[in-house]
């Protein structure tokens, strides 16, 4: 089993320079803006709460609720730790937005062909031995990338050696089953905009409890989601077929696709 990576964010070290925001924007091809709110064009931001700068990004939950509710597997937790997103599978149901306890996934409302956007911990970069762009850009080491277990030990060490600097808690160690993005702070996390009173149990476990008690609903729900996927896929096939017909290339469409478009019947 692979050791999972993560990011330790030390809010007492953040100087509010916004270098992480700029690096993230460059990595994703987003515009540079002065709006410090997560959006479909901002996968990480730095917000000020009182006298504390608080970097925000995906928490990369150990058992992500966003992935558990996705009916087509567009989101999943990798063995390495990051929660990644495959836009080619997404049907735009936006269940992930409703399920996330941290309100991370954002929807491209301004796009003709919208998708979900979220931090993926620069998965392609880290797979090639690099650090996430935001971590690499931070001049104050407010973000540290490494193995999650090592980061937890580092956080506990900081708390033990500097009890007057830090509150005695590592946010993300146990919240909603644990997260791969963890935080240190000098004031109570409730003062920094973090969700209060989160359970230690992973949120998908509550869903499983309900599904076990009402299996008929589970089957009905799965069937409905499969129907949504089929309808979306069929619309795509129809659009491709019509485009090929307009270009005078009817033979470019596979026979199987033609049967789907015809409703499963052989062409005559």
Image (cartoon, grey):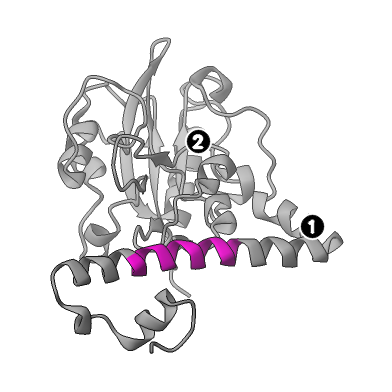
Identify whether 11 is placed above or below 216: above
Q: State the mark number for residue 232.
A: none
Image location (x, y in percent) of residue 19: 19, 31
Q: Residue furthest top?
A: 50
The secondary element bearing badge 1 is classed as helix
| Residue named by callout 2 | 103
Q: Main secondary structure of the magenta part?
A: helix
Image location (x, y in percent) of residue 124: 25, 61
Residue at image position (43%, 68%) is: 234
Residue at image position (50%, 34%) is: 159
Q: Is residue 230 magenta?
A: yes
| Residue named by callout 1 | 209
Identify whether 204 is placed above or below 252: above
Q: Is residue 1 left or right of residue 126?
A: right
Image location (x, y in percent) of residue 157: 47, 41
Q: Residues within 10 Å of mark 1 (few under 14, many from 20)?
A: few
In magenta, the rendered stretch is 225-238
Identify whether 207 is placed above or below 251: above
């Amino acid at each position: 089993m692979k050791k999972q990576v993560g990011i330790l964010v030390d809010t007492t070290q953040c100087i509010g320079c916004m270098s992480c925001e700029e690096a993230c924007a460059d990595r994703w091809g987003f515009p540079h803006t002065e709006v410090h709110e997560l959006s479909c064009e901002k996968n990480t931001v730095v917000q000020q709460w009182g006298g504390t700068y608080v970097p925000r990004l995906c928490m990369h939950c150990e058992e992500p609720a966003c992935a558990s509710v996705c009916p087509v597997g567009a989101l999943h937790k990798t063995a390495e730790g990051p929660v990644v997103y495959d836009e080619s599978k997404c049907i735009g149901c936006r269940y992930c937005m409703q399920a996330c306890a941290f309100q991370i996934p954002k929807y491209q409302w301004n796009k003709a062909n919208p998708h979900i956007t979220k931090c993926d911990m620069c998965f392609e970069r880290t797979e090639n031995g690099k650090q996430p762009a935001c971590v690499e850009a931070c001049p104050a080491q407010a973000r540290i990338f490494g193995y999650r277990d090592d980061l937890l030990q580092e956080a506990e060490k900081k708390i033990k050696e500097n009890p007057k600097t830090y509150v005695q808690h590592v946010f993300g160690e146990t919240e909603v089953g644990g997260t791969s993005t963890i935080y240190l702070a000098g004031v109570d996390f409730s003062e920094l905009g973090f969700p209060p009173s989160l359970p230690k149990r992973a949120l998908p476990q509550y869903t499983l409890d309900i599904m076990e008690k009402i299996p008929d609903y589970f089957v009905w729900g799965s069937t409905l989601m499969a129907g949504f996927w089929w309808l979306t896929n069929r619309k795509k096939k129809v659009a491709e077929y019509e485009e090929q017909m307009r270009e005078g290339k009817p033979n470019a469409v596979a026979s199987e696709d033609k049967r789907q478009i015809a409703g499963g019947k052989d062409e005559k």
